[in-house]
Image (spheres, rainbow, N blue to C red):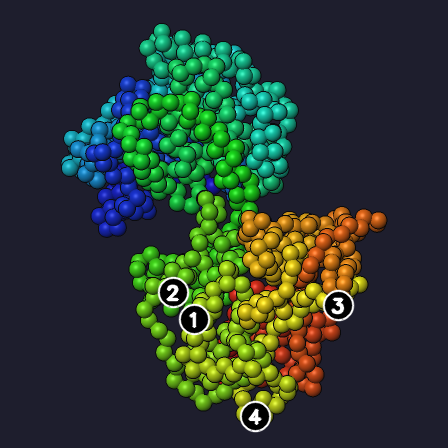
Amino acid sequence: MSEHMRTMPFGVLLNWILKEYETCQSIFGIPEAVFHKPQASDGFSSTLYGSRLATPIGPAAGPHTQLTQNILSSWLTGGRFIELKTVQIMDELDIPRPCIDLADEGYNVEWSQELRLEQSVLEYVKAWALIPILRRLLGVEDLEPFGTIFNMSVGYNMEGILSAPMQRFMNRLENASEDLAPIRSLLQNVYPQFADVVIADRIVNSVTLSTMHGCPPDEIERIARYLIEDRGLHTTVKLNPTLLGKERVLDTLHSKLGFSQIKIPDSVFEKDLSYDRAVALIRSMQAEATAKGVAFSIKLSNTLAMSNHRDVLPGEEMYMSGRALFPLTVQLYRQLLSDIGPELRVSYSAGADAINLAELLAAGAMPVTVASDLLKPGGYGRFSQYISMLRTEMESRQIASLEELASDRVAAIHHLIEDGLTSPRYKKAYHPFELPKVESALEAFDCIEAPCMAQCAVCQNVPDYAHWIRTGQIDRAVASILHRNPLPASTGHVCTNLCQTRCTRNNTDEPVSIRRLKRFALEHASSTLRPAKPTHHRVAVIGSGPSGLAAAFYLAHSGIQATVFEAKEKPGGMLSIAPPFRLPASAVDSDIQRIIDLGVDIQCNHKIDQPPEELLEAGYSAVYVACGFSGDAALNIEGADTPGVMGALEFLNRQAKGEQIELGSRVVVIGGGNTAMDAARTSKRLTGIPTTVVYRRTQAEMPAESEEIHDLLLEGNRIEELAIPNRILAEEGRVSGLECLKAKLGEPDADGRRRPVPVAGSEFIVPASSIILAIGQQADTGFLAQSSIITRPSDGGVDVLPTGQTDLARVYAGGDITRGPAIIIAACADGRRAAATICEQLNV
């Protein structure tokens, strides 16, 4: 992206608009589908500053209200209050780069225009002149009045505002007849279809004053009085959230919202306007404005100055915007409304979005402008969502006008405060993931790699199948899914969703429900797969878990006869023993049946005891070892062999078979992974009594998915944190309790989690009638004892080359046997990789 903004002549912009709209039904890349289309029933219009305002929203002064095309983009999608970028006398600034950081809550270090004053005024004039032309082009002249207000924004001190360049700038926006003359001439001579559009000479009759953080109160009042009395402008003064005071600001950000990383120096509060002085200023300016016959408003709120704690932007100080500012600003709004009274006029911009817009308007805010929200994915098109949700909300409340909507400002502002302080979407934890960046280099012609794909072990093309679902081509969506993922029904329920952690919508609200998309596609598809033409090659697959099934699926797709040997009576590996509340058996069965329909031969109750070499000698072209880690790891403490102690895999397997398991009333599960969660939630369903999960670290360090931990606790189970199992107690030949040592967290382990350190003399007893061990899994690779394949001494696993090949030719391995216990989709990736390598070596 260029460091410098480039302006374009009016004629070039108009030609661009006309040609793009004619050929693409879009303008500046914005599709017509998201253009604002006024409806006769809309009650959005109001009167502001003596003019009609068709919608109560628009862009706040910011980087996206500088160039003509940016202003028009806001207008096209529904913004009718255009707060022009703040300008000042110093118009040759060297803006530091980067200047905006919007990974979550927004931060910036830019605070003024990037164009010269002469350029700025011409950009605003061009935008003003093009709006009536757009109204005609889009056929909305008769659907709504002009209804657009341009609001001038100036700063930052009295001396600068009174300077000759700033005076010329303001004069030209108040009377733009000279700047409009060449535009009108061009329309007359080149674009006669627009020659008679009405373009008013006066562009602005209102102004927003923005002053620097720490500007003296007397200076703010002098400037405001000048704008009201001398220039006769409807005047708005922007106030800072520091008016709430240090204690309240930090308590809200740190304690209530969880933005604990934010540090605000005392100097920020000491230099800014005090609350009492702000109230006095508002009352004084209200009186001045009334006497002059203009309106006085306050803008809530400015950004919040703080120390630069992210090391993304240059400098020691930065300014916060976005969702974290919302709970602060609505509290300030209520306090000022209480002290000033109903005559308080508020222009709002601090974490406003489509969801809280209606309630902000109900609180009497007018207009509501946004900056940070428009810099997120969707851009200007997000305004169409604002309008849509406002329309829906007004219809649901059976309200016909914005005036009626704001009939109880106090109740609305109380609701906003409650929402701001309690709703998860304003808390830091609501967006737990980092920016969805990818590791690939940003090349000139290769700048698009979906982060969700990059995060997925099989590189599932989520954008592709989402597109086919959106267009109603469900069979194509399923084909796209199966191209990379052989177990879509199963992964549609229990995949760890790493893709969603990188979804670009994490920056916006919440990620796309990718698992649900898979399930939807499978439920509505009509096509079936056809077996491939046989190649007469045979491959043996040891194990029918996810990795073995994946290898068999892709081998069969290539015409290779795959025979899967499964030691147990049912295929699926870990999938077959997953609790039905997490993974329905029907989903696993459908995935396996699809594989069988391709011609794969799955032989259950067929344990492989001989080494892979013998399978090769029996005529198989290759062998894929995917036997997994199917055994429970042992807990080496006193009493581990007491009746009533069992492994989690044993427990889940017996439960899946329908066996009656004697658990008693006090089940304890030791462990912190997903298997522990499955065991605990299953035992709760069997006994009807909450299960206790004992974990040696804290809940924050648990390797289980947050979703599974949340569901565990939601169901009434409990977690005994920082508890190290010491010995198992027994009474009358059966488990009676688990003795633990309290732990504290020490230095980080190799995996980055802090090591649990036992506290001497801290023994305590957790009563137990059964204890389920979910502390790990171990390999069952006895059949490799006579093989030349080398197993790892540490865990019995097998090392492979990047292709999946072992140290024995024509023998491959993947899944848990190579990785250790891992996620399903990673096992599928190994199986697909091995199948591709086998096909390549067999010239298939």
Q: Would you say residue 44 is visible in this rendering?
A: no
Q: Position of residue 389 (x, y in %)?
A: 34, 38
Task: Determine the CA span between mark 3 and mark 4.
Answer: 42 Å
Amino acid on which the number 3 mark rests in the picture: Asp
Q: Earlier in the sequence, mark 1 or mark 3?
A: 1
Task: Determine the CA span between mark 3 and mark 2.
Answer: 45 Å
Q: Earlier in the sequence, mark 2 or mark 4?
A: 2
Task: Determine the CA span between mark 4 and mark 1.
Answer: 31 Å
Q: Position of residue 382 (x, y in %)?
A: 37, 41
Return the residue at label 3. Answer: 641
Return the residue at label 2. Answer: 522
Task: Determine the CA span between mark 1 and mark 3.
Answer: 39 Å
Task: Determine the CA span between mark 2 and mark 4.
Answer: 38 Å
Q: Position of residue 754 (x, y in %)?
A: 72, 51
Q: Position of residue 315 (x, y in %)?
A: 60, 35
Tell me, for residue 618, which label it has, or none.
4
Amino acid on which the number 1 mark rests in the picture: Ser
Task: Determine the CA span between mark 2 and mark 1.
Answer: 10 Å
Q: Give the quadrant of the C terminus.
A: bottom left
Point out the frontmost of discs 2 and 4: 2
Return the residue at label 1. Answer: 590
Q: Earlier in the sequence, mark 4 or mark 1?
A: 1
Amino acid on which the number 2 mark rests in the picture: Leu
Which image quadrant is residue 694 in? bottom right
